[in-house]
Image (spheres, grey):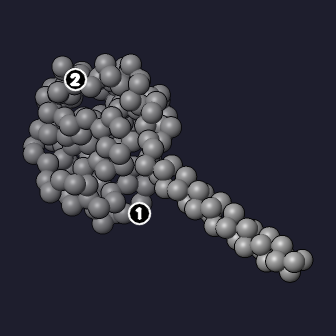
Amino acid sequence: MRNFFKWFGVIAFFIALFFFIYSVENKQAYKQTEPTAEEKVEENNPIINNVSNIQYVKIAGVQVKVDLALTGEAKRQGLSVREELGENEGMLFVFDQPEKYAFWMKDMKFAIDIIWLDEQGGVVFIKRNALPKSYPEIFKPTEDSKYVLEVPANFSLKNNLNVGDLTEFIY
């Protein structure tokens, strides 16, 4: 009888261990499908929701039609899903607060200019002609920015855009 309880205890231990491991794995899988904390903040952020209607950025006297990158996923993907960018087209990345946001050219298929803007829309840094082959190089401004505008390569030279120039958002 004593042997029976010994085996019963061993079997019960392994069953409990199995259910523990199973529940931990399910919890981890669930966590992977939940939005990140950053994405939750972005979804409920009134600042981002106010800019969600921006259609154009007027910069260096040119109206650039923009796609908006408001969510974490859109920011990670950026323009990497596009084959090309039209002459007066771009992508505007909108962040919660000013910081020195770094960008790279991972999975990009064409060169771009990357323009960092402060809270008032002033140009604080420009990376001209960022090439796809530059990956994994990281481009980072010297000043904090709240917005980042990506436009076709050489846009800033062609339109004589300089640090200190102002932009305007058009809804």
Type of amino acid under label 2:
Asn
Give the side of residue 135 with respect to residue 41, left or right. left
Tell me whether circle 1 and circle 2 mark residues in contact (CB < 8 Å).
Answer: no
Q: Is residue 148 visible?
A: no
Q: Dot 1 surroundings within 10 Å: few (below 14), some, or many (20 or more)?
A: few
Q: Residue 61 at what x, y percent from top left?
A: 15, 26
Q: Residue 140 at what x, y percent from top left?
A: 44, 46
- The disc placed on residue 70 is none
Quarter of the image for residue 162 reads top left
Q: Is residue 77 visible?
A: yes
Q: Identify whether 156 is placed above or below 55.
A: below
Q: Identify whether 107 is placed above or below 37.
A: below
In the foreground, 19 or 42: 19
Quarter of the image for residue 126 reads top left
Give the side of residue 97 with respect to residue 129, left or right. right
Name the residue: 24% across, 39% down: 91
Name the residue: 15% across, 33% down: 64
Q: Identify whether 24 is placed above or below 72.
A: below
- The disc placed on residue 53 is 2
In the foreground, 77 or 114: 77
Instruction: Indicate the quadrant containing the C terminus: top left, top right, bottom left or bottom right.
Output: top left
Name the residue: 31% across, 50% down: 77
- The disc placed on residue 136 is 1
Label 1 to label 2: alpha-carbon separation: 33 Å
In the foreground, 81 or 155: 81
Name the residue: 10% across, 45% down: 86
Q: Residue 36 at what x, y percent from top left?
A: 47, 42
Nearer-N-terminus badge (1/2): 2
Type of amino acid under label 1:
Pro
